[in-house]
Amino acid sequence: MHSSLNCAACGSDHDVDQLQNLCKSCGKPLLVHYDLESLKGTFTPEVVRGRSTRSMWRFLEVMPVADPAEIVSLGEGQTPLLKCRPHGAFEGFSNLWVKDESFNPTGSFKARGMSAAVTRARALGATSVALPSAGNAAGAATYYAAAAGMDCVLFMPEDTPPANIIESAVGGARVHLVNGLIGDCGKLVGTGRERFGWFDLSTLKEPFRIEGKKTMGYELAFDVADASGVNELQLPDVIFYPTGGGTGLIGMWKAFDEMEQLGWIGSERPRMVVVQAEHCAPVVRAFEKGADSAEMFENARTVASGLRVPAAIGDFLMLQVLSESNGTALAVSDEELLAGVREMAGGQGMFLCPEAGAVWAAAKRLCDSGWLDAEERIVLFNTGSGLKYNHLYPPGDLPTLDHTDPDCLDALG
Ligand SMILES: Cc1ncc(COP(=O)(O)O)c(C=O)c1O
């Protein structure tokens, strides 16, 4: 790893080999930079294709690790790009795909970020990590910390989906429920970390989770090339991303930039679409106002718990991505996003998380408005497994058949 650590806002330099969180000068996120020039010609798509590593760590040269023996991996990444049937609203769209992140360990894309962050934290001497989470990050942190032999301390809003709480408790994390939102949980981590010696793994307050999530961008270039039957790496024309803290969005944008510097792709970029929930849409609201940062979204609520982030520290970076990519941002209601989950389940055979149900609903809206073209290559992100949200779909009064009654099938009509 030949890298430096710089503030994403003021650019100031930080020691990449020190355990740290935000910029010491201005309090904004730190981003890692690699010596990509020196990798040109030796780190190539062919080299990556030829590797037997079955995880995101096949992009080793652009990952935050000095020695491969330090890697904490549970097999994250290399998720499938699934083709959608061109029907319904998308009749005629032959290049509509879902990048299905539910295939990751712990069932969500959070595995990528946690693998990178826990790898780096352990290498730099941390023995316990703490974070706020309203959902999937908790489970991922728990299991990567367990694999690394570290303690994991979690602060979760009390209305976090039961599956996320249970998987974390089963995995041995110290789980604390909090009568507030994720921001309130983050404050508790901030206060407790000095006192108890935890390392703060909060997204974008920790510099390496984004390095894991950026691998979604690297993978897409290979996936789209494979799906198009060509050797040269290709990016899609449009990417829909369910956005909370925005780490995945910012990470993918970083990956595209790195790939261009490596000479893997040209200057073409997808239009990035931020999708949020109607009652928690700080980035959408800022985008609509043309602002370069987002205000706190009061009384945030949505059943899509990963989107319940009323204020994100990377707000300015997300807005930069939207502007540079000529993208857009839109919010959908909880009813629409849950209807999106059901449509994708019955229509495409995929049980999406509600955050991705929002993406599907948003894509339909942009299809209706003509913003999307049937010829375009479009990727929708399913960031996690629908199974973690079973509490949203009570099966209702299903009749129980008496199999000893020979006439029991009569009621079926
Ligand atoms: C399933 C799911 N989708 C999307 C998000 C939002 O991700 P990001 O923080 O990268 O915007 C989360 C975050 O918790 C999530 O769990």
Image (cartoon, helix red, strand yellow):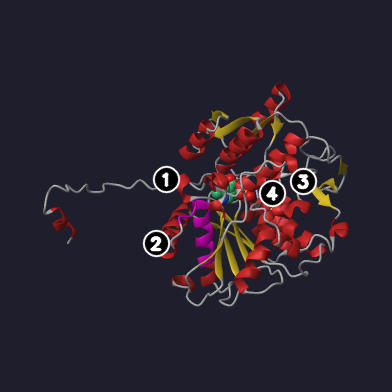
Q: CA distance from mark 2 to mark 3?
A: 40 Å
Whether residue 8 is visible to the viewer of this picture, yes or no, is no
- Of labels 2 and 3, the one closer to you: 3
| Percent coordinates x, y for residue 327 in the rendering | 66, 64
Q: Is residue 2 above or below residue 290?
A: above
Q: Which mark is residue 346?
A: 2
Q: Is mark 1 within 8 Å of ligand 1?
A: no
Q: CA distance from mark 3 to mark 1?
A: 35 Å
Query: Quick one: 182 or 249, which is closer to the camera?
Result: 249
Q: Are marks 4 and 3 in contact (CB under 8 Å)?
A: no
Q: 10 Å neighbourhood of mark 1: few (<14), some, or many (≥20)?
A: few
Please tell me whether mark 2 sits on a helix, a strand or a loop.
Answer: helix
- Of labels 3 and 1, the one closer to you: 3
Q: Is residue 82 left or right of residue 41?
A: left
Q: Is residue 355 magenta?
A: yes
Q: Is residue 48 magenta?
A: no
Q: Is residue 298 above or below residue 281?
A: above
| Percent coordinates x, y for residue 376 in the rendering | 60, 74
Label 3: which residue? 64
Residue type of the residue flagged with mark 4: Gly
Indicate the quadrant where residue 313 lies: top right
Label 4: which residue? 212
Whether residue 142 is visible to the viewer of this picture, yes or no, is yes
Say whether disc 4 or disc 2 marks the residue closer to the N-terminus. 4
Q: CA distance from mark 2 to mark 1?
A: 16 Å
Q: Which mark is residue 330?
A: none
Please tell me whether mark 3 sits on a helix, a strand or a loop.
Answer: loop
Label 1: which residue? 390
Q: The magenta stretch spans which residues?
A: 351-364
Q: CA distance from mark 4 to mark 2?
A: 32 Å
Q: CA distance from mark 4 to mark 1?
A: 27 Å
